[in-house]
Every structure is written in structure tokens, then in C-alpha cells.
Image (cartoon, rainbow, N blue to C red):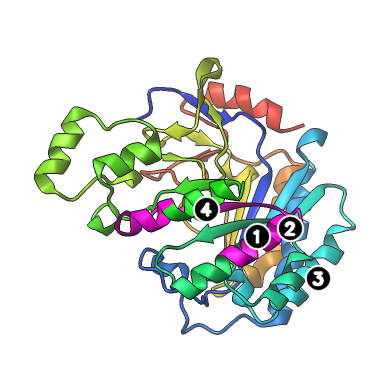
Amino acid sequence: MPDFNILEPLVPATFQVAWESTLKCNLDCSYCGDGHDNSQKHPELSESLSTVDFIIEYLDLYMRIKPDNQKKANINIQGGESIFHPNINEILQYLNNQKKHKNFFLSVSLITNAITGINRWKKIVELVDSFTISYHSESLKKQQEIFRKNVLYLKEKNKGFHVAVIMHPKHWNNCLEIIEWCKKNQIKHITRQIDHHWSDFRFNYTAQQAEYLTGSKPPDLMSKVVHFFKNGIDLSSQGRACCGNNTLCSEKNNQISYVRDNKFKGWHCSVDRFFLYIRQTTGEIFTNKDCEMNIDGEIGPIGFLSESNEILDNLRNRIANNTLPTIICRKNTCWCGLCAPKAKYKDDYDNIIKKYRK
């Protein structure tokens, strides 16, 4: 367990909607797991537009209970590969039209590998506020060149973006090369470890690689164990940084960028007030992609897109009657959702959550 009892972002987090718009992808990275499936069809355009309507209404309900200075939300379209969807331009245009009529700030972003033709890329760029460009070292050299050209186009257009370099332990030098390229071209970038199941040793890091990612050397005992088994260091079980690289605070305003022990089972958490995750291909709706904790204290979806009206009515009633419950974490490890304000004890949680609601 962590050696602190409270964790929250230094700056109040924007409500993040992660929308898995398609499972098809133009890459096939070994660490992706169930993040893509090219046997799946792209969702129909009409279904995708209905999902946009649901997201907007869901956000509107949560914004009603937030302080005026925190009424900010971001819809992050991802995949699979988001720009691989044949109707991505229509979806983006519809979303832009919808967000004009809301009483809260709403931005649209994409998580993408940016590997597409420049003409198509230019049309997409005009409809998106910001980008997270993921760099995958297992891609082809030709694809990596397309990546570079499209990233430079974003810089030319003064778009908000950053490059997330997925640090592959077996392609480490290639990852370091793209980091140096980002530095040379003054491109904002972050390094991302590969999260994975503890039994999958393919993505464990050497001691030197782990030190590079965490900024500190592993304990001596860990080094000895790693050396004995020769499987490397599993950073997923040892800690992580916030996905968005947000600085976090524990008690007494101690600021941290890497949470050494990311285990919060039994803690009180506000993940439902800062996250929403939708899998378009299955119709599942979750509070969060990784933790999947719902507002009834269970692990699983809060419902399905086919019952979106019932979900909205239930949320509307809970908000009106001030009966939104506090989620008690039941997961062993916290990945996405790390930055949601949380506390080990209820009194502490009740105290810190005041600043995030009316």
C-alpha cells in the first residue's frame, strides 16, 4: 500500500471521456492485447452519432455539480486506431456542431498513431483541438517516416499535441532515437511504460531502463531478484506515472510525478466524476477504462448504449437527490484513473472532494 493516505492532481482534472470508436487498427503491436481486433467491423455511422448524443448529455449532468471553474471536459476518440474509421470526418464534424450549444467547455482530442496520408490527415487536423500521438517502435520504417511528417504538420499548424513514446524494452534504442528527434524539433513528448499482466515477461525492463523511466534506481533487493530470474523489472506492478503526465499531490502538498506503489484497494475514489469510457463495438459503458469500477461499487459496466436513456435517467435522479455514492476501490492495481482524487479514509475523502463539487 502507498505510504500516504491522500492523492489528488495538483491542478483539478478535466473530465475525460475515452471513446473507443473502433477496434480496427493499421498496426499490430505485440503489447496491445485486446486494444485492437481487425476481424471486427467498423461501427455504423448512425450508431456513432447516437453515442455522441449520449456522451454530451452525460457530461452535461456531471457538469451541473461541478464548480464553475471546473466545468471542463474532453472527449478523447481512440481505437483501435481512431483515424482508421472510414467516417471519422463525419463523426468529428457532428461532435463539433454539438459542442457549440453547451454551457461548459468541451474539447475534442484524438489518440492516434498519426499514420495516414497527408491529405486525409489535414482534414482531420482541422476538426480536432488536440492530439496524443503515440509512437510505436514495432511499426515499419515507412510508417515511422509518415509519423514524423504528420507530427511536423501539427507543429506547423500550431495544434495542441504531445507525443507519447511507448517505451518497448526490446526496441529501446529506436524509442530513444524518436525522443532525440522530438527534442531536436522542440516537440513536447512523454515516455510511457508498457502496462501488462505480471506473468507476461516480454515487457519487463532492465534495471537501467527502469531507472530511465522512473528517475530512480530500484531497491537492492529487487535488483538481486531480477538478476536471479533474469526476467527484468515489471514496472506495472511497481508503480506508474499519470497517463497525462499530471503532477499529483499527497498530504502536506507533497508533489509526485511517479506513484511508487499504485495500489488503492479499499480507498474512496472519485473516478466516476472525472472519467467515462465507452466501447462502441460492444456497447459497454464504464466509468473508466482500466479500473471499471461502477457507481454501485462493483467491477463492470454501468450499462450499455442500448439502454442509454435509462442510464441518464438514473444519473439525473441521483444528482437531483444528492445520492451519488462514493466508489470504494476493489482493484489490486490502479492504472488509468490514477489522477482521480482519492483517499484511504472516508473523512479525508469527504474533505478533499469538497473542492471538486458545488
Q: Is residue 347 left or right of residue 306?
A: left
Q: At 65% from the left edge and 50% from the top edge, which residue is drawn?
A: 16
**Secondary structure of the residue carrying numbered label 2:** helix
Binning the other alpha carbons within 10 Å of mark 4 as few (below 14), some (14 to 19) or many (20 upward) gives few
Kindly check if marks 2 and 4 are in contact, taking CB atoms under 8 A apart as contact: no
**Magenta stretch contains residue 151:** yes
**Residue in front for this viewpoint, 139 or 104:** 139
Q: CA distance from mark 4 to mark 1?
A: 11 Å
Kindly check if marks 4 and 3 are in contact, taking CB atoms under 8 A apart as contact: no
Q: Where in the figure is residue 292, as x and y percent of width and height?
A: 49, 53
Q: CA distance from mark 3 to mark 2?
A: 22 Å
Binning the other alpha carbons within 10 Å of mark 3 as few (below 14), some (14 to 19) or many (20 upward) gives some
Q: Which residue is mark 2?
A: 156
Q: Which residue is mark 3?
A: 93
Highlighted range, magenta? 148-176
- Identity of the amino acid at label 3? Gln
- The image quadrant of residue 312 is bottom right
Kindly check if marks 1 and 2 are in contact, taking CB atoms under 8 A apart as contact: yes
Q: Is residue 58 left or right of residue 32?
A: right
Q: Where in the figure is residue 177, as x and y percent of width and height?
A: 44, 54
Q: Looking at the image, is 212 positioned above or below residue 45?
A: above
Tell me which numbered mark, 2 or 4, is placed earlier along the sequence.
2
**Magenta stretch contains residue 84:** no
Q: Is residue 223 left or right of residue 205?
A: left
Q: Which residue is mark 1?
A: 152
- Identity of the amino acid at label 1? Leu
Name the quarter where the N terminus is drawn: top left
Q: Looking at the image, is 64 positioned above or below residue 280?
A: above
Q: Which residue is mark 4?
A: 181
Tell me which numbered mark, 3 or 1, is placed earlier along the sequence.
3
Q: CA distance from mark 2 to mark 4?
A: 16 Å
